[in-house]
């Protein structure tokens, strides 16, 4: 079994065929999906999806692109919403200096607020970081000194210093379809050095479809191909990646129920 701990199946791209998307994931052996929040004020859209399917869970949080829009939402509200029985993580939140849709100061404040929520609830924080390695690591170190919190660097595309620094703080590192791209050798080199017990795989669907689907709409079933690329990078079997990443998921994510069975290999 595999888990796609980071996808966005509440988005408009999937509305017409959401039943099919979830069914194809299950048939491919993807036993659990987590639909990730990007705007707390649209939390109801996440709720509509997660109550519809047994093995689909959700998160609550504000993407760094929208950080400036939701700084008025207190940590206490994130914590309150996280008490929903099918909300299993916080975020996604973090720093994105590639697009800079929000001012850096707003992103940092939002990031710290979500860290506080993760620390208080014990739910893992899904961290988005792009072109912001140094500031991300600085905030992680500063916040970790205030008290540990569970977290994952989602869709990791950063440098070695960020990956190893996050591992030193007890965080996990997750790889998306980007690891399968021809020009991602540096990323595969980093993945090779991340211990199996700290690895995750994801799709970030509908974005970043792995080879051989690159350029097409990504969906959770494609995490199988991401797992294959990660296995090749580490020189282990796909089964070993599936076992390790699934065990990591149920160790870090304490609220989801382990499915009795999933389809696929």
Image (cartoon, rainbow, N blue to C red):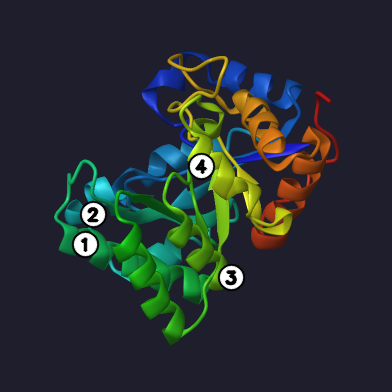
Q: Which residue is mark 4?
A: 187
- Secondary structure beneath dot 3 equals loop
The disc at residue 202 is none
Q: CA distance from mark 2 to mark 4?
A: 27 Å
Q: Is residue 257 above or below residue 25?
A: below
Q: Position of residue 152 (x, y in %)?
A: 53, 57
Q: Are marks 2 and 1 in contact (CB under 8 Å)?
A: yes
The residue carrying pointer 1 sits among few (fewer than 14), some (14 to 19) or many (20 or more) residues within 10 Å by Cα, namely some
Query: Foreground residue, 47 or 103?
Result: 103
Q: Which quadrant does the N terminus fall into?
A: top right
Mark toward the viewer: 1 or 3: 3
Q: Which residue is mark 1?
A: 71
Q: Position of residue 103 (x, y in %)?
A: 14, 55
Quarter occupied by residue 95: bottom left
Q: Is residue 135 left or right of residue 11?
A: left
- Secondary structure beneath dot 4 equals helix
Q: Are marks 2 and 4 in contact (CB under 8 Å)?
A: no
Q: Which residue is mark 2?
A: 67
Q: Position of residue 143 (x, y in %)?
A: 39, 78
Instruction: Tell which circle, 3 or 2, labels the residue nearer the N-terminal end.
Output: 2
Q: CA distance from mark 2 to mark 1?
A: 6 Å
């Amino acid at each position: 079994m595999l888990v796609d701990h980071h996808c966005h199946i509440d988005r408009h791209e999937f509305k017409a065929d959401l039943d099919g998307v979830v069914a194809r994931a299950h048939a491919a052996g993807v036993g659990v999906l987590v639909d990730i929040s990007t705007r707390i004020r649209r939390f109801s859209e996440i709720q509509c999806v997660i109550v519809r399917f047994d093995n689909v869970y959700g998160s609550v949080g504000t993407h760094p692109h929208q950080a400036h829009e939701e700084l008025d939402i207190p940590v206490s509200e994130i914590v309150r919403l996280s008490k929903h029985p099918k909300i299993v993580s916080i975020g996604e939140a973090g720093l994105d200096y590639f697009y800079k849709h929000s001012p850096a100061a707003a992103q940092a404040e939002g990031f710290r607020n979500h860290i506080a929520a993760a620390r208080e609830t014990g739910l893992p924080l899904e961290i988005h970081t792009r072109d912001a390695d140094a500031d991300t690591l600085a905030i992680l170190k500063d916040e970790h000194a205030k008290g540990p919190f569970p977290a994952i660097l989602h869709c990791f595309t950063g440098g070695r210093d960020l990956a190893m620094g996050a591992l030193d703080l007890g965080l996990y590192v997750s790889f998306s379809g980007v690891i399968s791209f021809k020009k991602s050798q540096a990323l595969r080199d980093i993945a090779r050095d991340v211990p199996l017990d700290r690895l995750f795989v994801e799709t970030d669907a509908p974005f970043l479809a792995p080879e051989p689907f690159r350029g097409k709409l990504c969906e959770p079933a494609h995490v199988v191909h991401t797992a294959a690329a990660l296995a090749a990078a580490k020189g282990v079997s796909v089964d070993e990646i599936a076992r390790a990443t699934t065990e990591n998921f149920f160790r870090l994510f304490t609220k989801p129920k382990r499915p009795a069975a999933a389809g696929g290999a």
